[in-house]
Image: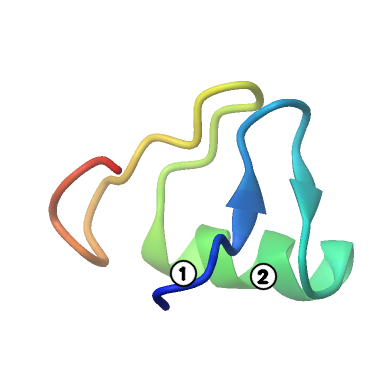
Amino acid sequence: MKQGLVSIGGCDTVVGREFVEFFVRTTFSWECGGAKVDRGLGKPR
């Protein structure tokens, strides 16, 4: 998790778009352009 998983510029991801959509759906509250952390890590990056 040290590396940037989500690019805040425009919802591009280092891994796969589908994987991250699933990941953020279960871990984050997803907002395009500002990836807002909801539960997973507990703090916004």
Q: Element under label 1? A: helix
Give x and y (percent) for residue 21: 71, 60
Where is 17 relative to 1, above or below? above
Bin the neighbour count of mark 2 within 10 Å (Cα to Cα): few under 14, some 14-19, many 20 and up.
few
Q: Which residue is mark 2?
A: 22
Give x and y (percent) for residue 38: 26, 46
Residue for point 24% across, 41% down: 44
Residue for point 49% across, 36% down: 35
31 displayed left or right of 17: left
For the C terminus, which image quadrant? top left
Bin the neighbour count of mark 1 within 10 Å (Cα to Cα): few under 14, some 14-19, many 20 and up.
few
Residue for point 55% across, 60% down: 4
| Residue type, label 1 | Thr
Q: Which residue is mark 1?
A: 26
Do the residues bearing badges 2 and 1 touch, measured as CB atoms within 8 Å?
Answer: yes
Specify the farthest residue to the front. Answer: 3
Specify the farthest residue to the top. Answer: 33
Q: Give the image quarter of residue 27.
A: bottom left
Q: Give the image quarter of residue 15.
A: bottom right
Give x and y (percent) for residue 41: 21, 64
Give x and y (percent) for residue 31: 55, 29
In depth, the one of 27 and 5 nearer the eye is: 5
For the N terminus, which image quadrant? bottom left
Mark 2–mark 1 Cα distance, whole angstroms, equals 6 Å
Q: Element under label 2? A: helix
20 displayed left or right of 43: right
